[in-house]
Image (spheres, grey):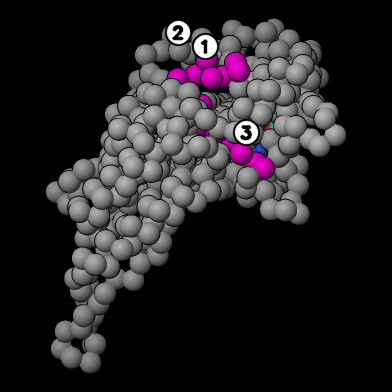
Amino acid sequence: MQLTVCGVGGAGCRIADRLVAADASRSRSFVVDSVALDTDQRDLSSLESIPDDRRHLYGVIEAEGAGVEGDRSVGAAAADSEATELGNAVDDAVSSQADAILCCVGLAGGSGATALPRLADELRRVYDIPVYGLGILPAVAATPDDGSTPTAARNTGRALANLTTTTDALLLFDNELWLGSSDSATDPEVQADLNETLTTRVAALFAAGEGDHDRQIAERVVDASEVQNTFGAGGIATIGYASQTIERPTSSRFGLGILEEEGEIDDTTAIKAIETTSRRAVRGKLTVEIERESVERGLLIVGGPPDWLNRRAVSDARSWLAQETGSVEIRGGDMPEPDGDAITMIALLTGVGSCPRVRAFRAAADRG
Ligand SMILES: Nc1nc2c(ncn2[C@@H]2O[C@H](COP(=O)(O)OP(=O)(O)OP(=O)(O)O)[C@@H](O)[C@H]2O)c(=O)[nH]1
C-alpha cells in the first residue's frame, strides 16, 4: 500500500522520519512521499530522512520556533494562523500514487495534536483516499492515586475526542505499555527505541501489499484494498506482531554434505510455526491494549518463505482469530519472502469498541 506519510509535532515528525528510513531499507517500498510540520525548529532540524524541502516550521509568532510545551491553546493558535500553509505543505506531498495518507502525532503535546484534527478534516474533504491517524499515548496515568489530572492526560483525552472523528481510523501506540520500568519517555534514546518498535510493526503492515511478490507461489498475497477494507471499520485500531526465526532443512548431494541444498520442510513443522506465531502476535503485547472481543474487523498477514506458508495452517490461524475476537470479518493474506529466514505475523485489529486507556484519557478530559 502506497502512503504519503505526514508527521505533525515532535513525536509525529520523528515517527514519520523513522518510517521513511524503514522504507528506504526495504525491497517493498510503501512511502511515496513525506512531510514534517512542527512549531519547533530544533526538532525539525534533527530529522534525518524527510527531505529538507518537505519540513515546515509553522506558528513562529505564537511559538517562537521552540514548540508550545504542551499548551494546547497556543498550539491551536499557531495552527490556525497558518492553516492554509499547512494544507498546502501536505498537498505537495500527496501524489496520485498514494492509496492513503498516514498522519503521525503525539497526542499529549500542544502542537501536533491541535493542528492535526483540522488538517485531517481538510484532507478528507479534498482527497478520495483515506486519512489514517497514528497517535501516541503518553506514559502517564490518566487517573493518578492522588486524584489529580495531569495535563498530558487531559490533552490526550481531548486529542482522542477530536481525532477519532476527523480521521478514517486511528491507530494507537501506548508509550506506557512499551516503556521499560526504569525508562523515561523524554530520553531521546528511549524515544528512538519506542519509535523503532512502532515503525517495525507499521512498516510491516503497509509494506505487505507491495512489490516483488511472485503471484505463482502465493495464493493470497495481501493487497492495498484488504488493508483499506480492514481499516474501513473506523475508530481505534491496534497492531499485534510476532516473528519466529526458522531453520530451513538442508539435504546434501554427493554424500558428506559437500554440496548442500534446501530440503523440503515437513507440514507439521510449518503448521506448528504458523500456529505459535499467530498466538504470540494476537495474545502478546499489542501497540495499545484492547478488549479483544470488542474488535469489529481483523487482518492477519503471514510472512515467510513460500514453502512455509502452509495453506491449512494459515486458514486455521484466521479461524482462530475470528473465534478469539468474535469478529466475522477477518481477512487474511500472505507476504511471501523467498529469501526470508523467519515466519512473521502481523495482526491488524480495527473498529475496537473497548480500549481501557482511551476510556481513561477521555474521562480525564471530561474532568476538565
Ligand atoms: N513514542 C514516542 N513518543 C514521544 C516522542 N516524543 C514525544 N513523545 C510523546 O508525545 C507527547 C507529545 O510530545 P510532542 O510530540 O513533542 O509534542 P508536540 O506536538 O511537538 O507539542 P509541543 O511539544 O507541546 O509543542 C509527549 O508528551 C510524549 O508522551 C517520540 O519520539 N516517540
In whole angstroms, how far apart are the C-alphas of marks 3 and 1?
25 Å
Instruction: Give the residue at the far right of this rendering.
Output: 146
Q: Which element type, helix, strand or loop, lies under badge 1?
A: helix
Q: Residue at x 47, y 30 (%)?
A: 352
Rendering coords of residue 119 (x, y %)? 56, 14
Give yes or no for contact between labels 1 and 2 (Cβ–Cβ under 8 Å).
Answer: yes
Give yes or no for contact between labels 3 and 1 (Cβ–Cβ under 8 Å).
Answer: no
In whole angstroms, how far apart are the C-alphas of marks 1 and 2?
6 Å
Q: Which mark is residue 121?
A: 1
Using the image, determine if residue 113 lies above or below residue 81. below
Q: Nearer the viewer, mark 3 or mark 1?
A: 3
Q: Which element type, helix, strand or loop, lies under badge 3?
A: helix
Mark 2 burial class by Cα count in 10 Å: few <14, some 14-19, many 20+: few
Number of numbered discs visible in the structure rendering: 3
Viewer can see residue 45: no
Q: Considering depth in this image, is 5 or 267 the residue closer to the camera?
A: 267
Give yes or no for contact between labels 3 and 2 (Cβ–Cβ under 8 Å).
Answer: no
Rendering coords of residue 171 (x, y %)? 51, 31
**Magenta-drawn segment:** 161-176
Residue indicated by mark 3: 357
In whole angstroms, how far apart are the C-alphas of marks 3 and 2?
30 Å
Q: Residue at x 40, y 65 (%)?
A: 245
**Is residue 167 a member of the stretch shown in magenta?**
yes
Looking at numbered disc 2 in the image, what kind of residue is underneath it? Answer: Arg
